[in-house]
Amino acid sequence: MELLPTQLAARIRTAIEAAQAAGALPDFALPESIPVQRSAKPELGDYASPVALQLAKLARRKPLDVAEAIAAHLAPGGAVGAVEVAPPGFLNFRLADDWLLAQVDAIIAAGDEVFTLAIGRGQRAQVECVSANPTGPITVGRTRGGVIGSTMANILRALGYEVEMEYYFNNAGRQMQLLGQSLQARYRQALGLPADFPPEGYQGEYLATIAQELIAQHGDALRDEPWQRFKDEAEAAIFKWIERSLARVNIRFDVFFNENSLYEDGSVWKVLDLLEARGYVYHAVTREGAGEEERAKVPPDAKDAIWFRSTRLGDEEDRVLVKSTGEPTYVLPDIAYHINKLERGFTYLINVLGADHIIEAQTVARGLQAAGYDPGPVHVLLHQFVTLVEGGETRRMSTRRGEYVTLDELVDDVGPDVVRYFILARSPNSHLEFDLDLARKHANENPVFYIQNAHVRCAGIFRQAAEAGLTDEGADLSLLGERERQFITKLLEMPEVLVEAYEELAPHKLAFYALDLARLFHPMYEEVRVLHSEVPLDLAKARLRLYRAARIVFRRALTLMGMSAPDVM
């Protein structure tokens, strides 16, 4: 389908060209895009365009005169019912009544694929999110990125993209060593053997649980195994836990990509060679341009590090690629990973990262540019952190210290749909305070209940209609009133919301839309009855038809948010 603003913009362009051909407007180059947006004041129309204000200078006319000329040459028909000119030069559009009512049947005909667009048709997209190393269970904080990412993946699919969800992790390094040593200590402690728990080890009870499982499987046969064996056991158990936990809130991955593979196939060092060949690498104990104070801190016997000359690409300072110890920083493998993504044929990539990764994301983009790749397809969606709030008190979480709330605990408490919606209903740019007291309520005050109850009510109407022998076949939708027409207009906003969420990396807009739609629905439901002795049969059929379309759109919105659309509650 084509977006309504796009349709109206095309009609305006044709009208301007017709006005120019008729001499009502002088010749001038038309802008590449013509702005059309939903009206902020429904009483003035359904959509509005300020294009005359933009063209006034080119036309050497008053904006109101330009708007009048355009309106006079707008051909009637299609979605356009009426065009009104308003000071200082707005074009206000009212949708044609017959066209608007016809959209009810169009929604029903499309069914679960309603409002599917072709923006990404024939293109491959990838969403990378969560990407926590397997050192512990998924916490609420990590879940935010997963919910945001999986919702963006659903939106991309609705726009026609072929989408893959990817999880990027590293099962090596100091964190994993500490994990192995921590499990080794818990295993030996459970057997009553001497054990030295690492000072910075992982203290969560989950390691004690894994240790008990190892004893059940192997007895004391692992007592003399090195920490590496326990690292492997912990990784396998925790990854299964992570996958199972994420699946509970409808987050599933197509690919698990291990950072170590970039070392095994030489990609990391190939990137270093490429950057050096292109003049973006130098060897020094300090970065170029370092001040005397910074240089004075360098020990006399310091060895050279390898630096990325990222300041050439707008960075405030150069970044270390390889430490003086010979160990790469995150920069090299991350650049190699993103080259790998691009070479797999993805044309649109979303990286969902915590807000503390902003410098990392910027450095990777510059690294791609330095390596000769276009960083344009890579879109970074940053999100702020999460705190749980209960009784006015907040709780922060640390996997290392064992102070956290797992995703499983939260799902057991409030349910998967509540977890997803409460995360989505806040802009990723804002800190999220997850209100547990509100989340537990099964009342209209809880937005999840309020939205899902709209779908429940639609389903209930059809159960009652079936019992009464009423169908919506042959419904005359012209019998619907103004309130119902306003609701239909709101239904038709959904594809525009999807495009806005896509263009602005703002999945919360879908959550806002679903709640706004429910706020229109429930008062209408109370007044626009179907099964009532005073409602004529033909009017009942028309209203039933509308509720069929409403049910489809609510189900579509809930599904795109990764939530269930229950028929009963």
Image (spheres, rainbow, N blue to C red):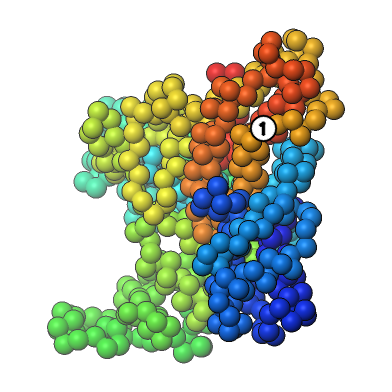
Amino acid at the residue labelled 1:
Gly
Mark 1 burial class by Cα count in 10 Å: few <14, some 14-19, many 20+? few
**In-front residue for pair 132/177:** 132
- Residue found 18% across the figure and 81% down from its top: 294
Percent x, y for residue 40?
Answer: 51, 52
> Is 391 on the left or on the right of 80, as rendered?
left
Percent x, y for residue 149?
Answer: 52, 49
**In-front residue for pair 449/245:** 449
> Is 490 on the left or on the right of 322, as rendered?
right
- The local secondary structure at tag 1 comes to loop
Q: Quadrant of residue 394?
A: top left
**In-front residue for pair 566/318:** 566
| Disc 1: which residue | 481
- Residue found 32% across the figure and 80% down from its top: 317
**Residue at the extreme right of the image, as rendered:** 474
Q: Quadrant of the C terminus?
A: top right
Please tell me whether residue 128 is drawn above or below residue 532 in the rendered image: below
Percent x, y for residue 269?
Answer: 50, 75
- Residue found 45% across the figure and 42% down from its top: 425
Percent x, y for residue 92?
Answer: 61, 58
Q: How many labels sit on residues?
A: 1
Instruction: State whether residue 485 appears in this view.
Output: yes
